[in-house]
Structure formats: structure tokens, C-alpha cells
């Protein structure tokens, strides 16, 4: 409650929220890049196996992010309204909801490893590696989901620094454990892909403990009383009103990437490995945009709850300008350094060639992709999840998948990458105009009916 985002200069507040998130996301992406580096040294088959797991890991991670978005939206708006008891109830019950989801998805996941990854195009050469990794990963999923939701609650209170520190500690733990458990350094057993999964689980467990301690003792966002069933269901309903569509929107992306991975698998394991490698580099290039989008949640949520629509619109205008400028910068940087970057992770010349094509083509659309990310975050924070899911579904299902199918048939992996760029450019531009119209409409309603906000 003490981090009030409804007053003061908008630009400096966004910078203050975003900078810690940049570092936190850098730590999270470094987490994945270190995994990619050490697994890439094991061989192309192992790297391809990890690339096949990427859509599934992203799906469950984005389900967690969706629940976190729902929690951020209701908690931030409750803070904007000044209701601390509601804040504590929502925070506590967001964690109980996360635990319930974990149990359901871990149970299903462990029973469907082979049929799922065969459907994604994994052959007999990589399926044993996938099984080694995912059997451990599923058992540790609780350490992924609960910290994501907990950190979202902390950010809703305007504190983006502490979640970033937690992510940094987790990344540091993973960086230390990867060479020990994957390669068997310093007397540890050589576990290869199993070691990568085990290092991830241990690092996430550290973040779980840290998030719970911060929520309970530093932010005091957890209720001292055990909620009864009726209150729990009531809180779950409010969280899921935003969280379910946000989770669905978040999961559309990795599921669609799974479909695209299937298209690429028709061109061999090398194409899949290159796609996975380039996607990790892309995440690093988009770090500033992703951090800004994450910061829009608490800022827009608090100001929307306090009826400060003019501040929301100003924040979005400044954010859109930044996204376009950052997109141009990254397109130039990756265009010049694609080969050297990809060669750091895998020495296979075929992998380097295909991954470099991705980094030459797709970054030209990063600016509009940033517009889309910021817009979706803003809509969710407003408690309006349906525009977000519509934008995401149009992007991935309406544009990317059909364009990628045609591109794969016509130009192979290169055609798939061109499809990604076209989808980003078209839908990102549309998202920008939709959000500006929504804010303008809300400001007109506020002017016509002072003190009354439309839904």
C-alpha cells in the first residue's frame, strides 16, 4: 500500500518499475541460456530434445503467468481502491489456487510424456532424452508455479525489485549447479539432461522459499487467518475472471510454437535445434520490452482502480514509443551479430546457419511485437482479459500458424521465420489501435459521468 503509483510523474515511475524487472528477466533468461549452453555441448540430439520440451515447459510456465496476471490485476486494483484486507485475502488465495493447479497438471503431464512428444514430432533418437528431462521437471513443477504467482503478488504492490532479486538468486543457483550436475564436475555424478532438470528444480525451490518469506514477513500480504471454503472460492472466482483468459492467452503462444516446431521437425532435428537456440537469444533481445510489459500490470492496475485514466493513457503512449525504438535497435544488433551469437551455443554449422536466418528476419518485427506485449498487459491489468486473448489468438492461430504452414511448404525453415515476422507486424499494429480506442472511450465516459467508471 505504501508504493502508491497513482500520483507523481509517470515516466520516472515506469522507469523505476521497469529497471529491476530488466535485471530480473535477464537473470531468468540467463537461467535458460546457461541450460542451453551446457546441453548444447552434449550434442545436437540433446539440444533438439530440450527444444522439443520448450513448448510444454512454456505452456505450463505461461499457465502460471496467467494465474499471476489474474492475481496482479485484482490485487493492484484493490490497492488502488485502498482495501488492504481484500489485498491479503486475494494474495493468500492466489497461492492456494496455484497449488491446486500444480497437482492437476503434474499428474497429467507424467502420464502423457511419450504420446505428447511423439505428437510434436520427436523421433526415437531424441525421445529417451526428453523422457529423462521431463520426468524430473514434472515432479518439481510446484517450485515453478507457486513462486511465479507469489512474485506477481509482490509486484502488484509496486515492488519490482524484490522479485528481481529472487529471480537472480534462482538463476545464480542454476548457473552453479548446471556444470556440476550436467557434466559431473567436482566429483558430482554426470547426469547430463537429468542434471539440467535437477538443477532447474533445485533453483526453483530456492525461489519458492524466498517468495513465501517476502510475502509473509516483508510485504505482509498474506492473511493471518486460514480462509474458509466459501471465501476461497470467492477469491478464486475473482482471480480466474482475469486469470483464466490470461492463462489461455499465455498458453496459446507455446501451444502454437509446438505446432510450428512440428512443421520444423519435418526438416530435421537440426532445424528444431536451431529454432530453440534462436528463441533463447530472442528472449534476451526482448528483455527490456518484456520488463516494461510486466511493469504495466501494477501501474495500470492501480491507476485504473483509482480512476486515473489519463495516467494510464500517458503511460501507454510513452511505452509504445520505447517499444518501437528498442525494436529498431535490436534488429540492427542481431542482424550484425547473429552468427557469432549462435556459434557460442552450438558449433554445428547447419544449426548456426538456420538460427542466423531467424535472427536476420524476425527482429524486424520486434517493435510491433512490443506493442502487442504492452497492450495485452494493460488490458489484463484493467480487468479486461478478452481483448488480450483475442489479440493473442489472432496473432498465433489466425496468422502465425497458417503463414508458417505455407512458409514451411514453400521455403522450409526460412519461410517459417518470414511468417513469424509478418504475424508480429500485422497484429502488433492492430493491438496498438485497439488499446488507444479503449482508453479514449473510457476517458469520454469519465468526462460524461464524473465519479462513475464503465466496466
Image (tube, rainbow, N blue to C red):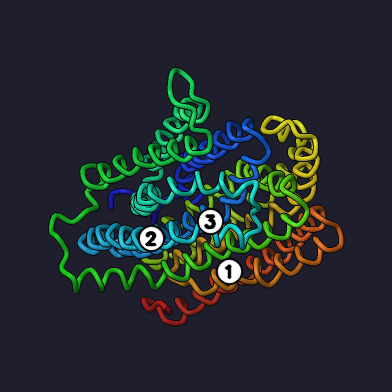
For residue 251, say whether it is visible. Answer: yes
Q: Is residue 452 left or right of residue 339?
A: left
At which x and y percent is residue 309? 46, 67
Q: Quadrant of the C terminus?
A: bottom left
Q: Out of 165 and 297, give the one closest to the viewer.
A: 165
Disc marking residue 435: 1
Identify the residue at image location x=26%, y=73%: 234
As displayed, is residue 61 above or below residue 392?
Answer: above
SS for callout 3:
helix
Find disc 3 in the rendering and name its residue: 56
Question: With 107 as the anchor, is 37 left or right in this view?
Answer: right
- The answer to whether 216 is drawn above or below residue 263 in the figure is above
Marks 1 and 3, the one that precedes in the sequence: 3
Q: Is residue 157 visible?
A: no
Q: Residue furthest right?
A: 410
Mark 2–mark 3 distance (CA, rounded to whole Å) = 14 Å
Q: Are marks 2 and 3 in contact (CB under 8 Å)?
A: no
Quote the CA–CA distance across marks 2 and 1: 39 Å
Asked if the residue under mark 3 is in contact with the one under mark 1, i.e. CB atoms within 8 Å, the reply is: no
Specify which label sits upstream in the sequence, 2 or 1. Answer: 2
Q: Residues within 10 Å of mark 3 (few under 14, many from 20)?
A: many
Task: State the CA–CA distance, disc 1 to disc 3.
Answer: 30 Å
* Dots 2, 1 in contact, CB < 8 A: no
Considering only order in the chain, which callout, 3 or 2, is on the residue closer to the N terminus?
3
Outermost residue on the front side: it is 124
Query: Would you name the residue on which mark 2 appears?
Result: 107
Amino acid at each position: 500500500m505504501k508504493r502508491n503509483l497513482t500520483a507523481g510523474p509517470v515516466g520516472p515511475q515506469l522507469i523505476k518499475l521497469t529497471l529491476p524487472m530488466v535485471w530480473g528477466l535477464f537473470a531468468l533468461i540467463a537461467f535458460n541460456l546457461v541450460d542451453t549452453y551446457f546441453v548444447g555441448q552434449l550434442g545436437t540430439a540433446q539440444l533438439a530434445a530440450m527444444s522439443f520440451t520448450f513448448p510444454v515447459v512454456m505452456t505450463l510456465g505461461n499457465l502460471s503467468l496467467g494465474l499471476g496476471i489474474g492475481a496482479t490485476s485484482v490485487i493492484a486494483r484493490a490497492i488502488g481502491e485502498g482495501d488492504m484486507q481484500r489485498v491479503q485475502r486475494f494474495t493468500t488465495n492466489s497461492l492456494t489456487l496455484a497449488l491446486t493447479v500444480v497437482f492437476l497438471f503434474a499428474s497429467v503431464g507424467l502420464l502423457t510424456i511419450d504420446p505428447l512428444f511423439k505428437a510434436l514430432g520427436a523421433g526415437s533418437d531424441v525421445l529417451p532424452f526428453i523422457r529423462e528431462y521431463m520426468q524430473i521437471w514434472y515432479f518439481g513443477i510446484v517450485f515453478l508455479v507457486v513462486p511465479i504467482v507469489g512474485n506477481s503478488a509482490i509486484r502488484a504492490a509496486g515492488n519490482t525489485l524484490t522479485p528481481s532479486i529472487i529471480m537472480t538468486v534462482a538463476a545464480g543457483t542454476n548457473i552453479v549447479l548446471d556444470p556440476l550436475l550436467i557434466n559431473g564436475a567436482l566429483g558430482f555424478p554426470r547426469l547430463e539432461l537429468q542434471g539440467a532438470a535437477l538443477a532447474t528444480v533445485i533453483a526453483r525451490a530456492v525461489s519458492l522459499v524466498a517468495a513465501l518469506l517476502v510475502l509473509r514477513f516483508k510485504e505482509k500480504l498474506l492473511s493471518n487467518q486460514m480462509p474458509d471454503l466459501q471465501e476461497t472460492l470467492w477469491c478464486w472466482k475473482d482471480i480466474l475472471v482475469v486469470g483464466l483468459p490470461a492463462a489461455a492467452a499465455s498458453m496459446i503462444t507455446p501451444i502454437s510454437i509446438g505446432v510450428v516446431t512440428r512443421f520444423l521437425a519435418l526438416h530435421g532435428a537440426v532445424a528444431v535445434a536451431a529454432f530453440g537456440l534462436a528463441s533463447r537469444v530472442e528472449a534476451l533481445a526482448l528483455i527490456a520490452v518484456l520488463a516494461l510489459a510486466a511493469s504495466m500490470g501494477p501501474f495500470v492496475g492501480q491507476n485504473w482502480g483509482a480512476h486515473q485514466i489519463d495516467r494510464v493513457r500517458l503511460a501507454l503512449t510513452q511505452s509504445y514509443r520505447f517499444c518501437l525504438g528498442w525494436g529498431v535497435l535490436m534488429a540492427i544488433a542481431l542482424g550484425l551479430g547473429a552468427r557469432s551469437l549462435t556459434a557460442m551455443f552450438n558449433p554445428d554449422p547447419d544449426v548456426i546457419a538456420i538460427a542466423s536466418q531467424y535472427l536476420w528476419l524476425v527482429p524486424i518485427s520486434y517493435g510491433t511485437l512490443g506493442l502487442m506485449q504492452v497492450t495485452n498487459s494493460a488490458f489484463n491489468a484493467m480487468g479486461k482479459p478478452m481483448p488480450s486473448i483475442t489479440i493473442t489468438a489472432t496473432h498465433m492461430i489466425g496468422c502465425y500458424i497458417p503463414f508458417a504452414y505455407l512458409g514451411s511448404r514453400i521455403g522450409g525453415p526460412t519461410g517459417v521465420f518470414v511468417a513469424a515476422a509478418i504475424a508480429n507486424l500485422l497484429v502488433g499494429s492492430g493491438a496498438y489501435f485497439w488499446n488507444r480506442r479503449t482508453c479514449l472511450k473510457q476517458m469520454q465516459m469519465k468526462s460524461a459521468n464524473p465519479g462513475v467508471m464503465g466496466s
